[in-house]
Amino acid sequence: MKYLLLIHSNPVTWGHPSFLHTEEGKKLPAPARQLLAEQLEKLLAELTASGELVAAEPLAAPHRTRVVRVREGVRATTDGPYSEAKEQLAGVFIVDVDSAERAEEIAARIPEAQFFAVELRPIAT
């Protein structure tokens, strides 16, 4: 079963990996920051080796986002995603796993889960 893992973050300076650029991440001692970066790299390597990782992509800064809506045949494009939101979508993983529990296990290992949230969405087939 495929899942989309939506990684949320609230970075002061957007960058990859986003947890290193947040206020919370910057407050961590250097060894703790390095440990989180290694945790992410280890997770990506394990998921690649097991064949569970379909894709993992960081997203560009929120200020580069555009939202398109068509109403009554008229296209309206605005800046996005939602400036009133403190947390923004920072990146995505697509995993192909045997169960929802496995997807949750993977989400819990993404460093941003310690600071913000990782949303799990089953991919409809």
Image (cartoon, rainbow, N blue to C red):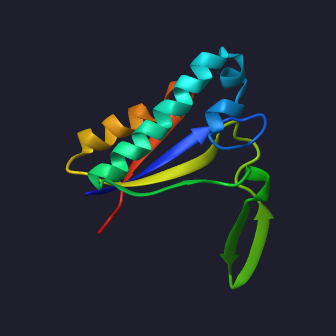
* Residue 11, above or below 25: below
Quadrant, the N terminus? bottom left
Residue drawn at 34 percent across, 43 percent down: 46
Residue in view at x 32 percent, y 35 percent = 105
Q: Which residue, as the protein is rendered here, is positioned at the far left? A: 98
Quarter of the image for residue 12 reads top right
Which quadrant of the view contains residue 33? Answer: top right
Above or below, 83 against 114 in this view is below
> Residue 74: percent from the left, percent from the top?
74, 82
In front: 73, or 91? 91
10 sits left or right of 8 in the view: right
Left or right of 90 in this view: 13: right
The answer to whether 47 is drawn above or below residue 40 in the figure is below
Vertical comparison of 67 with 71: above or below: above
Percent coordinates x, y for residue 36 in the rendering: 53, 27
Task: Count how many numbered circles sit on residues in the image.
Answer: 0
User: On the rendered image, what quadrant is the C terminus found in?
Assistant: bottom left
Find residue 67 and report its horizontal and vertical position in percent: 70, 64
Q: Residue at x 67, y 21 (%)?
A: 24
